[in-house]
Image (tube, rainbow, N blue to C red):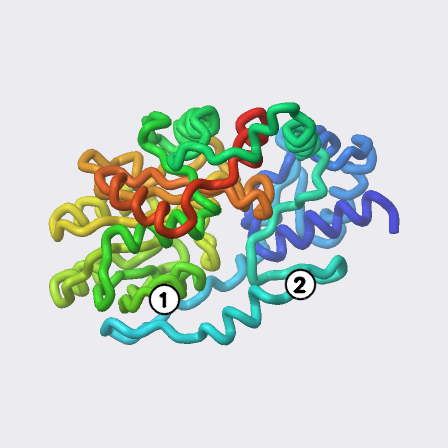
Amino acid sequence: MTLYVNLAELLGSRIENGLYRPGDRLPSVRALSVEHGVSLSTVQQAYRVLEDNGLAAPKPKSGYFVSASRAAPALPAVGRPVQRPVDISQWDQVLDLIRVAPLEAVTQLGRGMPDVTSPTLKPLMRALSQLSRHQDMPGLYYDNIYGVRRLREQIARLMLDSGCNLTANDLIVTNGCHEALSASVRAICSPGDIVAVDSPSFFGAMQTLKGVGMKALEIPTDPLTGISLEALELALEQWPIKVIQLTPNCNNPLGYVMPEARKRALLTLAQRFDVAIIEDDVYGDLAYNYPRPRTIKSFDEDGRVLLCSSFSKTLAPGLRIGWVAPGRYLEQVLHMKYIGTGSTAPQPQLAIADF
């Protein structure tokens, strides 16, 4: 199969899957040439294939656009979860999913996985290699329970893009985002407490609730605007909810980015009922637009939002480096981290800081 046909199929699949919507401008010929390492003429041939197939149309001096006549894929229907707190189940299904060994010919859709073969990771691999050859072996010592300071400083800089103005002292490095979420919910809740969650929600976070004896109250979630604030308000009035846990940016699996106005309204609602928000932002840096979407944390002025994320979706999950900005709950989250895993392995932290 020729290069231009491969490229045309890739772009076509993105259009079919709704990544590019009718009327959207497609990447420029030059941008695709650089991204895929092919000639300008190869990209032009690929666009002609899309044009012949009715997927794209050129506009003079403007580039190629998704054909406006194409119907967008149907959005998932808003779920109708039971309107009461429930115990978490399905551990057997989750275990079946996570114990599957990676296979070269199989794409695992049960987990978000970046391309770890990308040449852009070579500097990171060199940093890991250099650390292992270092005479004083810094990666073999215990480190500060908060995490390597150089890395926390880099994370604070990274979070500026999401609207957060934090320092290294506001952050705790964790073993992936999973530990950040787990330590956060355990820092605030006790067995029997109720946690409001978007529906559907991350199965790992749900199993944390199961493991510590908490109940989940699923809130209907729209595939465009996110968690229903109206349903959440009714739930807060009816039940003693301790925490709201959700993924407002690049949500998995629904894919939405919650509009800023609704993020602010959600925070106002949490303030009114005096509940904490655990914000899972692990996919936030994968947004297609720049600057990336703001976090709920960026609007938080009283420290009630615990922001959790990691490098698992942007670099590599095997590094197991995540973080949490716990706000007013810093001491409690730090205690949960200590009794859970202690400090996080310093070698990957040092390598990422250098990277």
- The x, y position of residue 202, in whole percent, is 43, 60
Please tell me which residue is depicted at 30% across the width and 45% down the height of the picture: 335
Tell me where residue 7 sits by quadrant.
top right
Q: In front: 165, or 268?
A: 165
Quadrant, the C terminus:
top right
- The x, y position of residue 262, in whole percent, is 27, 47
Left or right: 72 as drawn, with respect to 197: right
- The x, y position of residue 258, in whole percent, is 36, 48
Q: In front: 340, or 253?
A: 340
Q: Which residue is mark 2?
A: 101
- The x, y position of residue 238, in whole percent, is 13, 67
37 w.r.t. 14: above or below: above
240 w.r.t. 169: above or below: below
Packing grade of label 2 (10 A; few <14, some 14-19, many >=20) is few
For badge 2, the amino acid type reads Ala
Please tell me which residue is depicted at 34% across the width and 25% down the height of the picture: 167
Packing grade of label 1 (10 A; few <14, some 14-19, many >=20) is few
Left or right: 235 as drawn, with respect to 66: left
Tell me where residue 97 sits by quadrant.
bottom right
For badge 1, the amino acid type reads Gly
SS at badge 1 = helix
Q: Which residue is mark 1?
A: 211
